[in-house]
Amino acid sequence: MRIDLMAGAGLSLAPLRAAPDPTILLFDSGLGGLTVLDAVRRARPDARYVYAADDAAFPYGRLSEAELVARVLAVMEQFIASHRPDLVVIACNTASTLVLPALRQRFTTPFVGVVPPIKPAAATTRSGLITLLATPGTVARSYTRDLIATYAASCAVTLVGSRHLATYAEAEMAGSPIDDATLAAEIAPCFVRAEDGRLTDVVCLSCTHYPLLLPRLRALAPWPVSWIDPAPAIARRVLQLLGPGQRGEAGDGSGVLASFTAGSSLTAPLRDSLTLRGVNEVTVEAMPLRMQ
Ligand code: DGL
């Protein structure tokens, strides 16, 4: 059975509410969802934003499926109770490809998820060689395999489960960028040259952390490719659900509240990076990870 993660099972396409200033909560294991926040804020500048980062459990890519479902449900319980959002964006492929059905069953709040952009990748490629770059968790999901079978059956899809790239993106945001050689080695498996000379020409950024590194990934790629970031599609989906709002309005000036479940990596350079992305208040709602 295919579950339409992007569309929100049971939700009509009519806007959920016409009132201005809805509260939108964006959720990720760490800082990756900030790339989605940028796109959503451009679409609904009038909304109030909470950016919720489960940094106590970062990286999600290392958690088993059962651990991840339990963790996201528990954390979401608290964030929804604290912030009463009108809509939640699960700005994390690793969580969205697994947890959305359980979230929708537990909560009445509408959820929008981020899933690997296989469909646009298949429409973009000319060589027929696509790479899906994601966390090991996302690469392993049956949801991901199903997307590939449905939308990219005529392409050769290389799955690259990166163990370190999300951590490198966090380091970049915290002002301690990883060196070029290490970054180049991590993305090297994305670039395939077929025996007939065809080259990979599309790489799906299937972890929201990766666009944080995009300028460096472009510079280090052995040849030019199209990098597909699903964030604009997520913003369009939020607009479909919430309606356009008062376009052009800059909201109530309250900016973005960022809430962390640990906050242990909140260094001064990281706070500066957050400020540059519109975060004007940072808080910690401590939720330590207790693994069985
Ligand atoms: N940003 C997350 C994603 O989109 C995952 C990073 C992690 O926690 O492993 O998959």
Image (spheres, grey):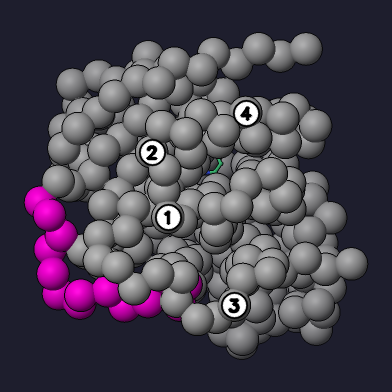
Is residue 135 visible to the viewer in this orientation of the structure?
Answer: yes
From the viewer's side, name the closer residue of 180 and 97. Answer: 97
Q: Would you identify the image quadrant in which residue 114 lies?
A: bottom right
Q: Secondary structure at mark 4?
A: helix
Image quadrant in which the C terminus is located: top right
Q: CA distance from mark 3 to mark 2?
A: 24 Å
Image quadrant in which the N terminus is located: bottom right
Q: Are marks 3 and 2 in contact (CB under 8 Å)?
A: no
Foreground: disc 4 or disc 1 = 1
Q: Would you identify the image quadrant in which residue 171 lies?
A: top left
Q: CA distance from mark 1 to mark 3?
A: 15 Å
Q: Secondary structure at mark 1?
A: loop
- Residue under pointer 4: 74
Q: Three-letter amino acid code at disc 4?
A: Ala
Q: Are marks 3 and 4 in contact (CB under 8 Å)?
A: no
Which residue, as the protein is rendered here, is positioned at the far right?
1
What mark, if any, has residue 12 been given in the picture?
3
Residue span colored magenta: 240-253
Residue 144 magenta: no
The disc, 3 or 2, on the residue closer to the chain's N-terminal end is: 3
From the viewer's side, name the closer residue of 111 and 125. Answer: 111
- Residue under pointer 1: 86
What mark, if any, has residue 83 been given in the picture?
2
Q: Position of residue 36 (x, y in %)?
A: 40, 56
Mark 4 residue CB less than 8 A from any atom of ligand 1: no
The disc, 1 or 3, on the residue closer to the chain's N-terminal end is: 3
Q: Secondary structure at mark 3?
A: loop
Q: Are marks 1 and 3 in contact (CB under 8 Å)?
A: no
The disc, 4 or 1, on the residue closer to the chain's N-terminal end is: 4
The disc, 4 or 2, on the residue closer to the chain's N-terminal end is: 4
